[in-house]
Image (cartoon, rainbow, N blue to C red):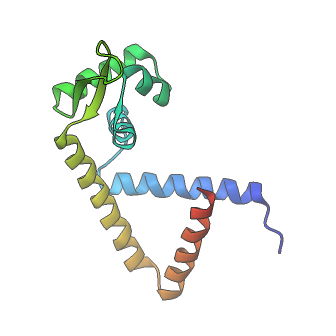
Amino acid sequence: MHLDPQQLAEELRQIVSTFVRNARVATATVRTSQHETLDLLDTHQALSIAELARLRGVKHQSMRLVINELEQKGMVLREKSPQDARAQLIVLSEAARQSLSAARAQRADWIAAQIADKLDESARNDLHMGLAALRKLL
């Protein structure tokens, strides 16, 4: 049996996109520009507004507005850059870390319930093997 990599890639893209979207809708953790920015800060620890704008593919001014909103909500803090005292870095607040963690746990719980409800032991083994294959793509 010949499996075309291009067809597999498109099917994987569609399935993963739909699955992630369904998980976010079902758990009311839908993505917004603010959530994407918080996720970037969680991954990178501290970034300048310019770096955040570049990583998100938006204009500096747009990112500045997002950061101002997040700062007003107590989700981010500004710190002086250790390399340049004139520059500021944006970091997550503890409230943001807790919010991100709670949203991830909520999605993981939903996914676990889907696995428990919809997959028998054989399908769970198939999923386990599929995850191993996905790890190789990383």
Taking 106 as reference, is 48 above or below it? above
**Pick the front one: 7 or 130:** 130
Residue name at image x 38 percent, y 13 percent: 61
Q: Residue furthest bottom?
A: 121
Left or right of 108? Residue 4 is right
Give the image quarter of residue 48: top left
In the displayed orientation, state which residue is furthest to the right.
2
Locate the N terminus by quadrant: bottom right
Q: How many marks?
A: 0
Nearest the camera: 128 or 118? 128
Residue in view at x 47 percent, y 22 percent: 58
Pick the front one: 135 or 69: 135
Residue 86 horizontal/vertical position (percent): 30, 12
Q: Residue at x 70, y 60 (%)?
A: 8
Residue 38 screen position, x and y as percent: 32, 37
User: 3 or 90, which lies in front?
Assistant: 90
Is residue 104 found left or right of 96 in the rendered image? right
Quadrant of residue 80 in the image?
top left
In the rendered structure, the answer to whether residue 138 lies left or right of residue 40 reads right
Q: Establish if 73 lies above or below 100.
A: above
Q: Please state the horizontal and vertical placement of residue 67, each as a whole percent of the image.
A: 29, 24
Quadrant showing the C terminus: bottom right
| Rendered position, 2 above or below 48 | below
Q: Looking at the picture, how far across and down is residue 123, in whole percent? A: 53, 81
The residue that appears at 68% across and 55% down in the rendered structure is 9
Tell me if residue 108 comes above or below residue 6 in the rendering.
below
